[in-house]
Amino acid sequence: MALYGRVARTERLTREMVRVVLGGEGLAGFETGPFTDSYVKLVFPLPDVVYPEPFDLREVRASFPRERWPRTRTYTVRSWDPAARELTIDFVVHGDDGIAGPWAAKAQPGDVLHFAGPGGGYAPSAEASWHLLAGDESAWPAIAAAVEALPAGARATVLVEVEGPADEQVVRSAGEVDLRWLHRAGGTRGRLVVDAVRGLDFPADGVQVFVHGEATMVKELRGHLKLERGVARERMSISGYWRLGADEDGWQSSKGEWNRQVEQEQG
């Protein structure tokens, strides 16, 4: 049976980001583990389909034709408070585009959201001498969670591309963090992040990298970090969350082939 939460409250953090806090008995047993990039697969039922109760995504997929399956969207766990049993997820909202963003913008206390997970695989290492975290607004929740988890004295450079100053957010950390907001101002998404990373001075060793966001940006930075900077694969968490011109359904269906092509090109 899929986990679920009931909307406890919402908050508009910036003009394009809405925070939804989930609570309730459906979160019993949920835990995120040690990862700061923990993510869940949110489940959005099709409006014209009646699904059996209690809702079970595996059962639905086994008994319904594919075109009647609920849509799923992958989102980072911004925070999990096991004592209060509250799960916080931040959504980028672009008007009525997409599924998850419009849902978050209209969410009301008591609304139910089913999900599966969590997954995850990255957390800032206490042994790294320098952390590089870079991405666009889609990666900000994971980046912010990592910054908050940095141990005292850890050095980090954080590069986050957003549309403008109104989209900046505050994050606290025990580490020594150089946070740089890059204002796109209508420009090509991801370009500022690529240029900023290319312009950095890297330490000789001990680097740990987290780069996520738009797929073309991630592809270029993966090649730069691996081939030009010599960062070992095991020292990088790097992945495309989304791709310009494709919704998540389209991106996920093509992501495997995209990654294979990147592997062939960059080794």
Image (cartoon, rainbow, N blue to C red):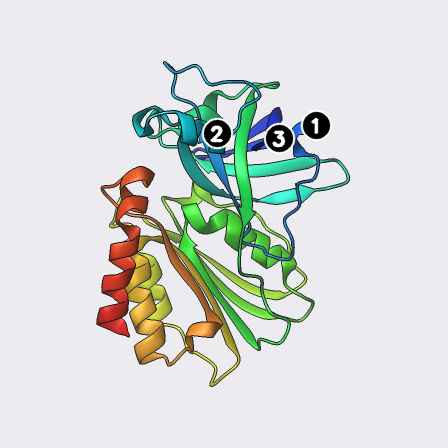
The nearer-to-camera label among 3 and 1 is 1
Residue type indicated by callout 1: Glu
Q: Quadrant of the C terminus?
A: bottom left
Q: Say left or right for 80 vs 68.
A: right
Q: Say left or right for 253 vs 131.
A: left
* Residue 122 visible in rendering: yes
Residue at x 48%, y 49% (from the top left corner)? 140
Residue bearing the label numbered 1: 25
Are dots 2 and 3 in contact, CB under 8 Å? Answer: no
Where 208 sits versus 134, above or below?
below
Of marks 2 and 3, which one's residue comes earlier in the chain?
3
Picture coordinates of residue 89 (x, y %)? 55, 38
Residue at x 22%, y 42% (from the top left corner)? 245
Picture coordinates of residue 221 (x, y %)? 32, 66
Of marks 2 and 1, which one's residue comes earlier in the chain?
1
Residue bearing the label numbered 2: 59
Residue 22 got which mark?
3
Picture coordinates of residue 79 (x, y %)? 62, 44
Where 27 sits versus 207, above or below?
above
Residue type indicated by callout 2: Glu
